[in-house]
């Protein structure tokens, strides 16, 4: 079973929000080292934390990170962005492309770039941060990007499982971070979410359904589309 004890963890978008909670909880569970990556890395007050520059959308930056962090056993694809609007009708082509690039293409390419590093270990882990928005299209291109990443996570899981890499996908509604500052409604604390994620990793589970909203949306997917979108009934 995968364990955080002695693991070498790399977190993208580690400077704040859920990323910082991943750093703290990995160390609390006995990780030997955590690469806290960010476009502009910050200083950390713990010698087990290695700040590392990584822009996930920049191929040269990704290659440099793979070279620098060639002992990673747990890769956490946490970094993501919220586009300026949830409306496809109002979204610019540039924002459409930037959101798909950051939330879908970059995490997939990061996972494939680190795959040789991960699979060099007998047990390794990939965690991908999706959202309830993967299954509920209230977010426009944000939802589309997270749906695409969810699908890629499932494909990567099938490819990587025979090579010893355990792949976990995370679905959650609102979490109390800068990204959800605009939103009302119940929000998990980042630490509460990360506890669920690492519990799932260490139990050998595949998917985190972190809150009631996410559970209810997932269960509605097998019903006709208007069950999930009652406004369609007019
Ligand atoms: N908060 C929620 O309600 C919620 C719900 C479901 C899923 N999520 C997902 O959870 C993940 C973490 O989000 P959060 O809530 O912690 O939001 P956040 O505080 O806004 O953090 C997002 C992080 O992603 C980083 N990032 C963005 N583009 C990047 C790039 N090109 N290269 C490297 N880092 C980049 C940001 O770095 P900079 O500091 O450099 O901008 C930031 O640290 C995201 O994937 C998000 O979609 C969040």
Image: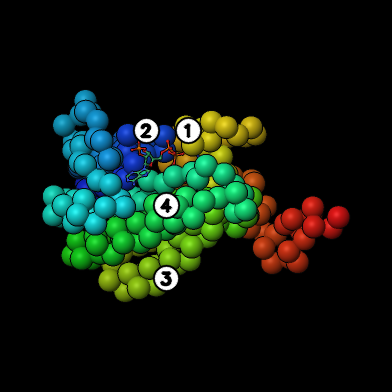
Of labels 3 and 4, earlier in sequence is 4
According to the picture, the residue beneath numbered tag 3 turns out to be 155
Q: Do the residues labelled 3 and 1 touch (CB within 8 Å)?
A: no
Q: In this view, does 85 lie to the left or right of 57?
A: right
At 30% across and 45% down in the image, what residue appears? Answer: 11
According to the picture, the residue beneath numbered tag 2 turns out to be 16
Where's residue 147, x and y in %? 52, 60
Of the pair 180 and 218, the residue shown nearer to us = 180
At 77% across and 61% down in the image, what residue appears? Answer: 226
Mark 1 vs ligand 1: CB under 8 Å?
yes
Residue 32 visible from this viewpoint: yes
Q: Are marks 3 and 4 in contact (CB under 8 Å)?
A: no
Q: Are marks 1 and 2 in contact (CB under 8 Å)?
A: yes
- Number of disc labels: 4
Where's residue 119, x and y in %? 23, 65
Mark 3 vs ligand 1: CB under 8 Å?
no
Instruction: Give the CA separation, mark 3 to mark 1.
Output: 29 Å
Instruction: Give the CA separation, mark 2 to mark 3.
Output: 29 Å
According to the picture, the residue beneath numbered tag 4 turns out to be 98
Of labels 1 and 4, earlier in sequence is 4
Q: Do the residues labelled 2 and 3 touch (CB within 8 Å)?
A: no
According to the picture, the residue beneath numbered tag 1 turns out to be 177
Instruction: Give the CA separation, mark 1 to mark 2.
Output: 8 Å
Mark 2 vs ligand 1: CB under 8 Å?
yes
Query: Element type at marker 1?
Result: loop
Residue 72 visible from this viewpoint: no
Of the pair 47 and 56, the residue shown nearer to us = 56
Of the pair 10 and 180, the residue shown nearer to us = 180
Q: Residues within 10 Å of mark 3 (few under 14, many from 20)?
A: few
């Amino acid at each position: 079973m995968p364990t955080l004890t002695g693991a070498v963890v790399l977190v993208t978008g580690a400077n704040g929000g859920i990323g910082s909670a991943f750093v703290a909880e990995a160390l609390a569970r006995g990780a030997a080292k955590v690469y806290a990556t960010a476009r502009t890395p910050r200083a950390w007050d713990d010698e087990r934390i290695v700040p590392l520059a990584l822009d996930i959308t920049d191929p040269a930056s990704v290659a440099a990170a793979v070279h620098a962090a060639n002992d990673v056993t747990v890769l956490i694809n946490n970094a993501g962005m919220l586009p300026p609007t949830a409306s496809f009708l109002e979204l610019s082509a540039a924002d459409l492309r930037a959101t798909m690039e950051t939330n879908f293409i970059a995490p997939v390419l990061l996972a494939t770039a680190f795959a040789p590093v991960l699979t060099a270990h007998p047990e390794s882990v990939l965690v991908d941060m999706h959202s309830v928005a993967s299954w509920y299209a209230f977010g426009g291109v944000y939802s589309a990007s997270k749906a695409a990443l969810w699908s890629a996570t499932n494909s990567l899981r099938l490819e990587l499982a025979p090579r010893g890499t355990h792949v976990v996908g995370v679905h959650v509604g609102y979490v109390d971070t800068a990204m959800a500052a605009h939103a009302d409604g119940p929000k998990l604390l980042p630490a509460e979410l990360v506890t669920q994620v690492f519990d799932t990793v260490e139990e050998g589970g595949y998917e985190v359904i972190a809150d009631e909203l996410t559970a209810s949306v997932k269960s509605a997917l097998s019903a006709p589309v208007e069950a999930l979108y009652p406004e369609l009934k007019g």
